Image (cartoon, rainbow, N blue to C red):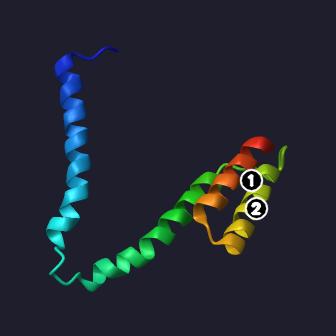
């Protein structure tokens, strides 16, 4: 399917506008001199862990313990990621090495 120049310009313009707005709106709603509501502070504390939990569940939802390779690559990688994160406390290191290990195992 091919798109006209107007369709492409409209698409990229809307995507750019949405990206800019998502970056600017928090600064407009919560300027530096205004107190941030407790609910927003609560969300900023809770949401990162919630999102990571959802990603882990999503990534592991289709594994099978009853057929080969019996979820071994996923289990080994998850153990390595957990160990590295508890040991080094470096998210990028644990996720990066865990991903590389998973790719090697599969």
> Which residue is painted at 14% across and 66% down in the image?
28
Numbered disc 1: secondary structure: helix
Numbered disc 2: secondary structure: helix
> Measured from the top left, where is residue 49 in percent x and y?
51, 71
> Measured from the top left, where is residue 74 in percent x and y?
74, 53
> Measured from the top left, where is residue 9 in percent x and y?
19, 26
Residue tagged 1: 74
Q: Is residue 45 visible?
A: yes
Determine the CA span between mark 1 and mark 2.
Answer: 10 Å
Residue tagged 2: 80
The answer to whether 1 is drawn above or below residue 40 in the figure is above
> Which residue is painted at 46% across and 69% down in the image?
48
For discs 1 and 2, the disc positioned in front in the rendered view:
2
Camera-side residue: 91 or 40? 91
> Which residue is painted at 64% across and 53% down in the image?
96
Q: Earlier in the sequence, mark 1 or mark 2?
A: 1
């Amino acid at each position: 399917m091919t798109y006209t120049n107007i369709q492409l310009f409209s698409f990229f313009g809307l995507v750019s506008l949405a990206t800019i707005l998502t970056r600017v709106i928090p600064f407009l709603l919560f300027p530096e001199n205004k107190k941030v509501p407790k609910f927003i502070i609560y969300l900023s504390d809770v949401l990162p862990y919630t999102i990571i939990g959802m990603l882990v569940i999503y990534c592991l939802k289709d594994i099978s313990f009853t057929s080969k390779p019996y979820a071994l690559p996923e289990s080994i990688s998850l153990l390595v990621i957990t160990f590295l994160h508890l040991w080094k406390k470096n998210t990028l290191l644990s996720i990066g090495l865990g991903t590389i290990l998973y790719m090697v195992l599969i």
